Image (spheres, rainbow, N blue to C red):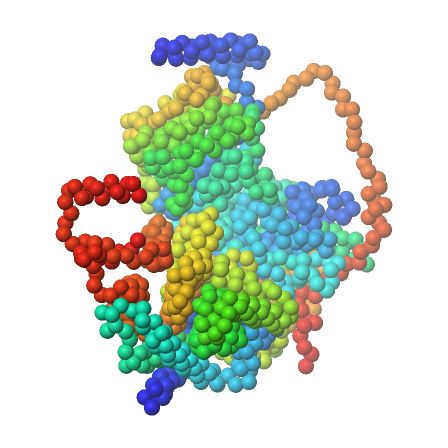
Amino acid sequence: MIGGVPPPDPGGGYVSDQNSNNIPSPMDMDSTRPSRKRQIEHSHLAPRSLREVMSRFQVEELHLTLTEGQWRHKQWGYPVLDAAPGAELYAWFSPEVTNIDNQWKKLTSTLAGLFCASLNFIENQNTINPQMSLWPSGATEHLSNSSSYLRYASLPREIVCTENLTPWKKLLPCESSHGFSSLLNSRLIHNTNYHSVGVHVRKICANTACTETFIEIKQTVALVYDFKILNSINWSFKLLFGQGLLGGCPLASSSKIYIDITSNSTTHFKLTPPPNKIVESHRGGSEVTLAIYEIKPDTAMLNIAAKQGTNNRVILNIPPPLYFNRYVLGYGKEFGGIVTEIVNNYWAPIDIVLSENAPWWLPIQLSTLRINGKAKSKLVMGQYYSPGRSRQKPYHLELLLRLPPKSTTTVTIDFEFVFLKWQEYPPDANHGFYIGSALITANLPTAKNFTGLPIEGVTFDSIFNASKPWYPAVFRTNGAMVSLPTPDFSMPYNVICLACTVVALAFGPLHNICTKELVLKATGAPLGLRQKLINLFKKKQD
Amino acid sequence: MSKICCLKLFICYVFLNLIFVDTDAFDIPEGFEKSNHTNNWAVLVDTSRFWFNYRHVANVLSIYRSVKRLGIPDSQIILMISDDMACNPRNPRPATIFNNAHEQINVYGDDVEVDYRGYEVSVENFVRLLTGRVPPDTPRSKRLLTDEGSNILIYLTGHGGDGFLKFQDSEEITSQELADALEQMWQKRRYNEIFFIIDTCQASSMYEKFYSPNILATASSLVGEDSLSHHVDSAIGVYIIDRYTYYVLEFLENVHPNSHKTMSEFLSVCPKHACISTVGVRQDLFKRDPRKVPITDFFGSVRPIIITTDPIDIIEIPKRNKNTENKTTNVVQKRMYLPQFPVHLIPSS
Amino acid sequence: MAVILKYIIAGLVRFWLIHTDYWQTISNRVEIATPLNSWKRLIEGVYLYDNSINPYEGDSFHESPILLIFFHFILKQAPYIMPMFFTIVDLLTAYFLYKTSKEFVGLLEKNQEKNKDDIANESKSMLLQGSQLSEVPEYVLSVFLFNPYTILNCVGMTTTVIQNLFLSVSLWSAVTGYQLISCGCIAFATHQALYPITLIVPISILLADANKGCNKCSYIRTLLVFVLCWGFLIYISAYIMDGSYDYVYNTYGFILNVPDLKPNIGLFWYFFTEMFEHFRLLFVCAFQINALVLYVVPLTLRFRNEPMLLATVLITLSAIFRSYPCIGDVGFYLALLPMWKPLFSYLMFAYLKREFTLKHGTARLVDGKPAKLVLR
């Protein structure tokens, strides 16, 4: 667990995290509970419900996040693990699974029950199968075609509230009674600019040859507080969580809080009580200073607080090497376009995979794809496109791009609006329809602003001095919203009557032409009463 | 004609009493009839969407809180909430819902479990839940796993009219459909007794079509009457609870798992001067006398405990299967970490 | 001379409109472009095909694979030729309609001469005069060339332009008796849009009339040639798509099942947007039967001696009741209407009334008493 004080950004926002400064971090020690594969039926600290899900549906790796709000990469830097707004779920299945789509449906319904979320709305029509953007982070057997066992879906409309936090807390061995999760008071954490809870399950190597594996369950929470709501630029656990921390979970082998105090050299602030340790980490050209608090089960009530110096000025926010923005173009309800702007702020080119996905009711046209306004661009090194089909599968486009240094790349693609059937509209059809985030997988050449764990890393201390040539990271752009054309929901009977009338108008005369013949019938002088009666009689006889 | 009916009823009554007296082996407080239910379930449904229907969510959560406090576990409560009020951007106090302008009780609490939420609350899902005809992958928390020993409390709130109840402001369930669903439950032996509460306008029209046995029904208003809300919270600008549920909650706050309150007290909870609408009651389908039914038969939970003085013999301890280890050892799978970026796809220039 | 002038003016108007700024707007209008025929979808399909993605995998493209590779070829080789191409195709359509109506008028005249003896004396004045007949092809030509519907359809560069060409060629060749051309064209139109399949009935009658001899043999031969052509086209399409018949679901399936509810000038989208889901299949079947087969048999029995009238009526009905109609279809049938200009004064049931009057004379008398015409 980390806690941290972020540099106050120009907008006055103030970022904190369950753990620390603008770094949301995995609750490492609390939640990493390796257990041997053989004893898969046993679960000591790992929640049995999750273990059963993993073995029953033969899931190799699972990532589920429930997020409210949008992470602002440009202002806030990078989170440890990014998450799409709403619910996001992706999983790799074991190669033994024959019908993955079926298994995926079962997995989503089970998780829906487990986390009180509407994950059962995940169906084939909103599931994609990314080819380039997602790679298993755990130790894996399927080396070449991992993507065929992968399913990805996000529900941007999903609301995240107390009922999702409760089951999340119940997965922890100490639940919400002890340890860090006792800090998570629903009223305070939902009063933030951004909050995200996540569960990440993967298999990690148990020995150096990697013939055996552990299962690692990582539970993460990321919170971004707003200065204005806190009404203070100083922060403390009491202010953020409403209470101090009363010892760690007795079942944990280690509980640590990391606070990023790198900015302390420019904007001075004072931490109370003083940290147990201060560590400097040099990683890929960036230097980070972290204050570490070790929490023991018997630690007395701990209320970590930071007090800002008196003469602190507003610090200029330096954007990270790569950031992006996404928006919808167009007016009216016929045509539109999605634009993704990606800024490479670094002096070297950065390779990325951009994974756009549009729901079936927003068909995109690949022929309208423009990169910086051009149909054919040298930036594209690879492309994958899976066209959607109405009510069956979404449109999915992946682009492998090389972003030139210090540049902005604009990817535009046009879409058409689709008319849904009357009963396919949600009850609040005029609220608008959400488009999910695009995924951006970047191969960052620098660790500036990057706080992700190295792939073999289990706990947060694995980032110390973990320099690598590349720092791969997956980001989510912001989602978007469109308003689809809506019919008049009160009119079905009128419509049916009108359409049937048109058909009848054609049918009637044609029926007459085809089945009747023209004859002459006498008119002339009005008939007498007697004649009329006779005629009537005659007719009856006929 | 009516005399015969009366007579029949009387005989029936006596007969039932006799049976109960006969089988009465446990110590039941004086004046109560024995119930033969073995478990308790609650289905609590808020059917309306949109912020201005805040009060309906507050209604249903108030009942939820009460039944939970009185002992029905979350696993036996099916809570359906059509819209998110707690974390709604319009809610100045996120993750809270109050049923009182004084903000005494946060009915959303810290460990609420909403089983059906948002668009999942539909007529189809509601009827499927009741009748048990859910899709095969449905998780436990979204199933009503009742049996013939279950007492079910059904509470509905939302906007209704004469003979229907609106769901999500876009579809409706009619009283006939609801009655048929309950009949199907009865035929499938999915309940022992049902206590049906509905707080909507013209609420009593919803139970008039019921024809299955063992249902006690009450409604916040009669046909032709509106159910009114209790008071507004000017801080959030919406009405925050309906009159009927407000007084029901006031009553339930004084009920404890051991209290001796009866259903008849519950049925007379909101007199006309307080509710403005007339509370309707239908008890012809219910075999027992509400005056003798403890309120905990529906609002509490039965925890069957068998006290034994004899030691219990556990005959067989399942032995561990040792073969499994041999099976797994022959295959050694070599695993490795994959690169997290498709570097191999980048053409080398 | 005047005819050539018409062609030139009409061609210039089309060519010019394609090059104006309004072209984009026109080709995107829902009245002109449906999911089936729009230029935008054609481009998308060609683009996907060019990038070796199966255009029929998704929902982006619903045209026939033959047109797909045809346009793929043209757009690769000479994309600038497109405006010219569409203009010329439309002018050709006009030309063939003109020829058709000329042939038809000739036939009409011949028939009239032949049946002169059956006509009541007092109705003789109603017989069509030479001048009346000679102006018919002029009208047909003008209506097709200068009808805003056809102009916009051509300017929008929809594939309906090509379909209209095939329809007109098949009508012309049927009237003149070229069996293979006629069947081939109608098979292609059917392959493209399915609904022209009904036209095989009037065409086989026309062919039988044009080629004297055994009528029944002619019908069977025509049908056989048509089925073979159609089957061949289906096979060729599958061959283009590497032996996969998946495209059938995305072309015929798309036409029959109406999954796209984008507004157009037809009835389907309007009706099925607000249809209760469990009745959908029933009404889809009812509407498709109405558009495809319902009227063919009774109308054929009624008008078996007037195959051209039968063709006009069937084209009109399918233009109105098809699942994705556009104004190009309407423009085409409107161009056929002037052939019946002499009947306009009779309005409804015009043909029947005229036949009746020709036979029985203008006097409406039964046993010397005044009478009126009624349907029985």
Name the residue: 40% across, 37% down. B174
Q: Where's the C terminus of chain A, which quadrant? A: top left
Does residue C101 appear left or right of residue B122 in this picture? left
Q: Quadrant of residue B231?
A: top left
Q: Quadrant of residue C367?
A: bottom left
Q: Position of residue A10 (x, y in %)?
A: 46, 66
* Near-viewer residue (A202 or C14): C14
Name the residue: 82% across, 43% down. B324
Q: Is residue B125 above or below residue C366?
A: above
Q: Position of residue C232 (x, y in %)?
A: 59, 71
Q: Position of residue A395 (x, y in %)?
A: 54, 64
Q: Residue furthest bottom?
A: C1
Q: Is residue B238 above or below residue B266?
A: below
Name the residue: 32% across, 29% down. B222
Name the residue: 43% across, 26% down. B211
Q: Position of residue A42 (x, y in %)?
A: 74, 41
| Residue C44 in view (yes/no) | no
| Residue C99 in view (yes/no) | yes
Q: Is residue A286 above or below residue B298?
A: below
* Near-viewer residue (A282 or A185): A185
Does residue B315 appear left or right of residue B153 in this picture? right
Count numbered badges in the picture: 0
* Near-viewer residue (B4 or A114): B4
Does residue C77 appear left or right of residue C313 in this picture? right
